[in-house]
Image (cartoon, grey):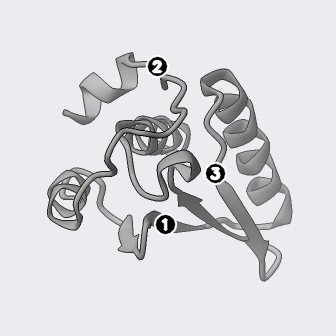
């Protein structure tokens, strides 16, 4: 499934669609080691060797997020740690877009 998500493109979400249930989100997360459900979002923390590597990762995530027009919350802390949080704000929960972007973020660090 993760490989299929890499081939997809995020679609604009204007609201109205129901968010994934917690059960559906947890099932999807089985393919995303390191990611966890956090309220109405999925999150993962990435650790790098140094500041420059962490910043480079953030820049790459930013490029992918712009291409997908789906933007994560990014927390850069402790000079080499990056926490990514994904949710679909228009529906106040998780959509397929969040998992598409998670798959593409995973591809950056693989």
Residue 71 is left or right of residue 31, and the answer is: right
Residue on which disc 1 sits: 44
Residue 48 placed where, x, y %?
66, 65
- Say which quadrant the N terminus sits in: top left
Please name which of the two marks, 1 or 3, marks the residue nearer to the observer. Answer: 3
User: Residue sitting at 84 percent across and 65 percent down?
Assistant: 51
What is the C-alpha distance between the residues marked 2 and 3? 15 Å
Front residue of 56/96: it is 96
> Is 14 located above or below residue 41 in the figure?
above
Residue 78 in percent (x, y) is at 78, 82
Q: Secondary structure at mark 2?
A: loop
Going 37% across and 17% down the picture, which residue do you hit?
7
Which residue, given by chain and number where applicable, does mark 2 sit on? Answer: 9
Give the vertical position of 26 relative to 77 (above or below): above
Q: Nearer the viewer, residue 101 or 45?
A: 101
- Residue 32 against residue 98 in the figure, above or below: below
Contact check, label 1 and label 3, Cβ < 8 Å = no
Residue 16 or residue 68, whichever sits in front: 16
Residue at disc 3, secondary structure = loop
Residue at mark 3: 72
């Amino acid at each position: 499934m993760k490989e299929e998500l890499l081939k997809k493109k995020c679609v604009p979400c204007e609201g109205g669609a129901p968010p994934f249930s917690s059960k559906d989100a947890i099932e999807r997360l089985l393919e995303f080691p390191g990611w966890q459900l956090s309220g109405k979002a999925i999150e993962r923390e990435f650790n790098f060797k140094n500041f420059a590597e962490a910043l480079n990762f953030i820049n790459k995530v930013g490029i992918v997020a712009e291409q997908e027009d789906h933007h994560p919350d990014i927390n850069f802390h402790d000079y080499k740690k990056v926490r990514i949080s994904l949710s679909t704000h228009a529906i106040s929960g998780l959509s397929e877009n969040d998992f598409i972007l998670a798959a593409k973020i995973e591809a950056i660090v693989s």
